[in-house]
Image: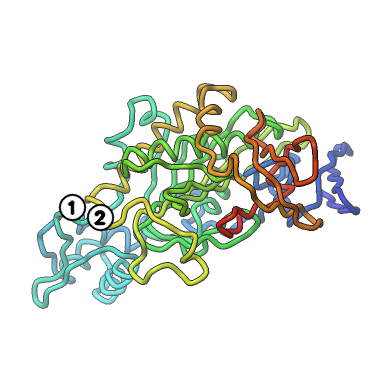
Amino acid sequence: MLAIVPPAGSCHISHRQNSQISFPPLIYASYCKPQSALSVDISFFPAVYYTSVCANFLGKGGYGMSVKAQVLSALDAARGRYISGQELADQLGVSRAAIWKAVTALRADGTPIEAITNRGYALPHGADLLNADAITALLAPAVAQAVQITVVDRLPGTNAALRTQATNGAPEGLVLIAQAQSAGRGRRGHSFFSPPGGLYLSILLRPAFSTRQSPQITALAAVAAARAAEQLCSTPIQIKWVNDLWKNGKKVCGILTEAAVDLESGMLDYAVLGLGFNLVQPSGGWPKELAAVAGSLFDSAPAPGARAALAAAFLNEFWALYHTGLRGSWLDDYRRRQALTGRHVTLIPNGSEPRGATVLGIDDDCRLLARCDGDLAPTAFGSDEIRVIPELGALA
């Protein structure tokens, strides 16, 4: 059994071998696997954010095709041609009512299905659909061999689904992409707005990284995502420490890395890296609380295939950086893209009063270097230690 006892200021985690590891205060926790492993949010470390093992949204041990997915696949294969509801029902072995329900749900997810009485349903030739084949066709050969891509129309969260697969022993390289999320999650347990039209991608990694090295997964992913986004939108992309991408001062992508830690070795058992890209403004506009800070990669609807191209560009960039090692040239790019360097910000330390500070840069462990007002020497902060409010007033 795993015993969690959180005294003031730290947490000692004891397992059946009676060894102990000390961590900062816990946010929430659950037992992840019997071999002394914990599921943690490692957008940064050493803070430990434990994540409960979610329900397997896609069926036990695999990704079974729902009626929605089968209908979408059938319409995609017949692009531009109308298929009657009865023909679809016969083809899939379900009722007409099930076909109608699937089409209604697909439309709610943003899929542009056309319907004409007495003719049936059709997908326009130019409809922008995500599918694994379209993404794989754009991958570098080495990346195409290393990853296994699954695309679904909607999930509560891609990270949560992959964490379940990871605890069941799934290999590195599983990529799960959703066209929308109903319960997307960001750092510190915040909800992540994930409407149809975005790109929501998670990848399962099994890196030989220690917990101290783990923040660099998020950092190199940010560099890969920025490079991929620039390939499509041709606009400079900045990184707002620690895990947001900015275009013209607005957030266009968020990154969340979660992992399981082997308590005996201090090494990661697995990491799930998740990204959410805003390609266009949602049809109903941004929610009021996001209107001042959220942006999109494109000002108007992108060309068909943009999401597949973005997914492939990210995977190509990330896989190359991931295998260059922790001290590759990507760290220089991460520093160069920092949106806050040289700016005066407000730091909100955990359990302390806010302090003004000037951001000086990023250290070798991807911590924020800042000189607090009134201090002579700079301080390096992990993102478990502080929140950052830029001058524009957006909360990190």
Point out residue 373 in the picture as x, y percentages from the top left corner. 75, 46
Amino acid at the residue labelled 1: Ala
Of the 4 image quadrants, the one containing the C terminus is: bottom right
- Are circles 2 and 1 on residues that touch, CB within 8 Å? yes
Compared across the picture, whether 258 is left or right of 17 comes to: left
Query: Looking at the image, which residue is at 64% across and 29% down?
Result: 209
Question: In the rendered view, does 110 fall on the left or right side of 166?
Answer: left
Question: Number of marks in the image?
Answer: 2
Q: Position of residue 258 (x, y in %)?
A: 61, 45
- Mark 2 — residue? 73
| Badge 1 density bin: few <14, some 14–19, many ≥20, Cα 10 Å | few
Residue to which mark 1 is pinned: 77
In the image, what residue occupies the spot 51% across and 42% down?
A: 239
Residue 301: x and y in percent read 26, 57
Left or right for 106, reference 127: right
Q: Nearer the viewer, residue 150 or 259?
A: 259
- Residue 386 placement, left or right of 96: right
Residue 392 position within the rendered picture, expressed as x and y whole percent measured from the top left:
55, 57
Q: Secondary structure at mark 2?
A: helix
Cα separation between marks 2 and 1: 6 Å
Q: Is residue 375 above or below residue 5?
A: above
- The residue depicted at 46 percent of the width and 59 percent of the height is 294
- Tell me the element at label 1: helix
